């Protein structure tokens, strides 16, 4: 499933750019891409559209998935912080989170809600995710353990993950926005995944950079997603498609709701737009 360069016959296409989230969207529940979704994306790119993966995963957690998919184009990673060339295994742009600002934001949230469990995503192609005491993480992803919070600040970061022992994800994100939203960006990217980001950073900012490299704009773009971190991308794109399994906040701003990630939701939409995609 190679990524595609700028559209060749863009004037004849319904959309010249297809932007897809990974987890809960393009990936099924077992972290694979169905043959039908592969065929639909291949037909879209064969027609001349570009495909860009836009994921909350930073490059180290995304590149193995992209390699397994034989994806060779641009990928927007780390909630927009990184533009990665998958074919060349090269980081084109990277934005870091100021660690002092992040520490101040954490202090404000803890003063309001009590102690947090933290994890930190370090910057770079090989940046580790460092997990502090009590943080619950996906068991299939590589992490480093930290004895205390101080170890989380020892290297440049692209984002922090925060969890609370009592507040659910929506409540924690809302609290973080209320008390620290003037310092950092806050987003919810999945179950147990509330993140603190550089202020102003979203998937939309990263996608706009990647699209510009291909000579494309928001008017050319159809975007697929499932979580609140996809809201800015939907607002930027000409057309936003939420999966059936999407968070209600994303569905509320979507132009369309398709089937779930386990029911070929992306393919169902692309097959109508690019008829050669039908299998």
Image (tube, rainbow, N blue to C red):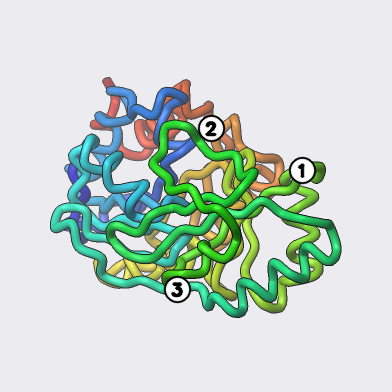
Q: Residues within 10 Å of mark 3 (few under 14, many from 20)?
A: some
Q: Nearer the viewer, mark 1 or mark 2?
A: 1
Q: Which label's residue is closer to the chain start, 1 or 2?
A: 1
Callout 3 secondary element: loop
Residue 278: quarter of image? top left
Distance between the Cα atoms at labels 2 and 3? 34 Å
Helix, strand, or loop for circle 2? loop
Q: CA distance from mark 3 to mark 1?
A: 27 Å
In x, y percent, where is residue 143? 43, 45
Q: Which mark is residue 96?
A: 3
Residue 258 tag number: 2
Q: Position of residue 236 (x, y in %)?
A: 52, 64
Question: Label 2: few (<14), some or many (≥20) within 10 Å?
Answer: some
Q: Residue at x 52, y 50 (%)?
A: 131
Mark number, residue 113: none
Q: Quadrant of residue 196?
A: bottom right
**Of marks 2 and 3, the one in the foreground:** 3
Residue 59, quarter of the rendered image: bottom left
Q: Residue furthest right?
A: 112
Q: Is residue 186 left or right of residue 66?
A: right
Mark sitting earlier along the chain (3/1): 3
Q: Are marks 3 and 1 in contact (CB under 8 Å)?
A: no
Element at label 1: loop
Instruction: Name the residue rendered at 69%, 71% in the picture.
Output: 105
Say if 45 sits above or below 218 in the image: above
Q: Vertically, is 162 above or below 45?
A: below
Say if 253 sits above or below 42 in the image: below
Rendered residue at 51%/53% (across/down) = 146
Q: Which residue is mark 1?
A: 165
Q: Is residue 205 left or right of residue 209?
A: right
């Amino acid at each position: 499933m190679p990524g595609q360069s700028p559209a060749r016959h863009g004037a004849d296409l319904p959309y010249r750019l297809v932007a897809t989230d990974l987890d809960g969207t393009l990936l099924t529940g077992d972290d694979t891409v169905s043959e039908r979704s592969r065929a639909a994306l291949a037909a879209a790119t064969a027609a001349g559209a570009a495909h860009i993966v836009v994921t909350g995963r930073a490059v180290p957690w995304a590149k193995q998935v992209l390699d397994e998919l034989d994806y060779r184009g641009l990928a927007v990673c780390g909630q927009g912080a990184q533009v990665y060339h998958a074919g060349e295994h090269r980081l084109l742009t990277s934005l870091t989170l100021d660690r002092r600002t992040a520490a101040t934001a954490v202090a404000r949230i803890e003063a309001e809600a009590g102690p947090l469990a933290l994890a930190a995503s370090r910057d770079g192609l090989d940046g580790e995710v460092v997990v502090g005491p009590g943080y619950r993480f996906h068991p299939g992803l590589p992490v480093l353990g930290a004895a205390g919070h101080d170890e989380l600040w020892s290297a440049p970061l692209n984002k922090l993950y925060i969890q609370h022992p009592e507040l659910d994800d929506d409540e924690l994100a809302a609290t973080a926005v209320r008390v620290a939203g003037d310092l950092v960006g806050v987003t919810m990217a999945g179950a147990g995944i509330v993140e603190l980001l550089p202020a102003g950073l979203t998937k939309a900012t990263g996608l706009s950079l990647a699209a510009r490299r291909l000579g494309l704009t928001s008017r050319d773009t159809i975007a697929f997603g499932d979580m609140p971190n996809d809201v800015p991308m939907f607002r930027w794109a000409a057309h936003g498609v939420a999966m059936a399994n999407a968070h209600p906040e994303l569905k509320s701003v979507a132009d369309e709701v398709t089937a779930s990630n386990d029911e070929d939701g992306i393919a169902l939409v692309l097959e109508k737009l690019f008829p050669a995609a039908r299998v």
